[in-house]
Image: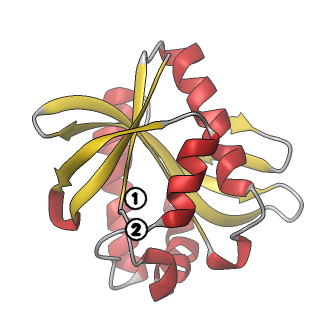
Amino acid sequence: MNILETNRLVLRLLELADAADLHRIYSDHETVKFMGKAPDSVEEERNHIQAHITNHYEKYGVGLWATVLKENNRLIGRCRLMRKQIEGVEEVEIAYLLDREYWGKGLATEAAEAIIKHGHAKYGFKRIVAVIHPQNVASIRVAEKIGMKYERDVLYGAIGNVALYALEA
């Protein structure tokens, strides 16, 4: 099911059939170096997708979305709008990850802008945050381009110390 469309992208719900493409993307060390542990197999990724469908789509209506390039209908990454606990506070977090082949083309910014607008318009989220590894300069640039401002450093799960960026509606 499609959630959003931009000029070049379709953002849709993840499907179990996406596991092989996501595993391929996650297998590139450079692509996932700021993400945390990638799944070890396609089957493990399929299990993650199934758990995500149950724990996020069905419970909250938001979560990870497949990022598909319109011109060839290829899954090129994933993005998300999810409720997350950050230092004991429930926040709505945006995230984006693209296959390295598609970096530097403005696609992450295009997806992020659409996600922010969707979060405000459809769900009425007043505040959306991004947690970004301080060395992930490209992701910081995307956050700043969409109007997010650095607030502070926070501890974020297994990733550790990250920068918290926020955008108020």
* Badge 2 amino acid: Arg
Q: In the rendered view, would you say 48 is above or below 55?
A: below
Res. 136 image quadrant: bottom left
Secondary structure, mark 2, is helix
Q: How is the image coloured?
A: secondary structure
* Badge 1 amino acid: Ile
The one of 42 and 35 positioned closer to us in this rendering? 35
Secondary structure, mark 1, is helix
Q: Residue at x 52, y 71 (%)?
A: 22
159 displayed left or right of 64: left
Q: Residue at x 19, y 40 (%)?
A: 86
Instruction: Give the residue pinned by disc 2.
Output: 46
**Rendering coords of residue 81 (x, y %):** 45, 38
Q: Residue farthest to the right?
A: 71
Q: Residue at x 62, y 73 (%)?
A: 99
Which disc is residue 142 wearing? none
Instruction: Give the residue pinned by disc 1.
Output: 49
Task: For marks 2 and 1, give the CA distance.
Answer: 5 Å
Do the CB atoms of the residues marked 2 and 1 lie less than 8 Å apart? yes
Image quadrant holding the N terminus, namely top right
Q: In the rendered view, would you say 77 is above or below 142?
A: below
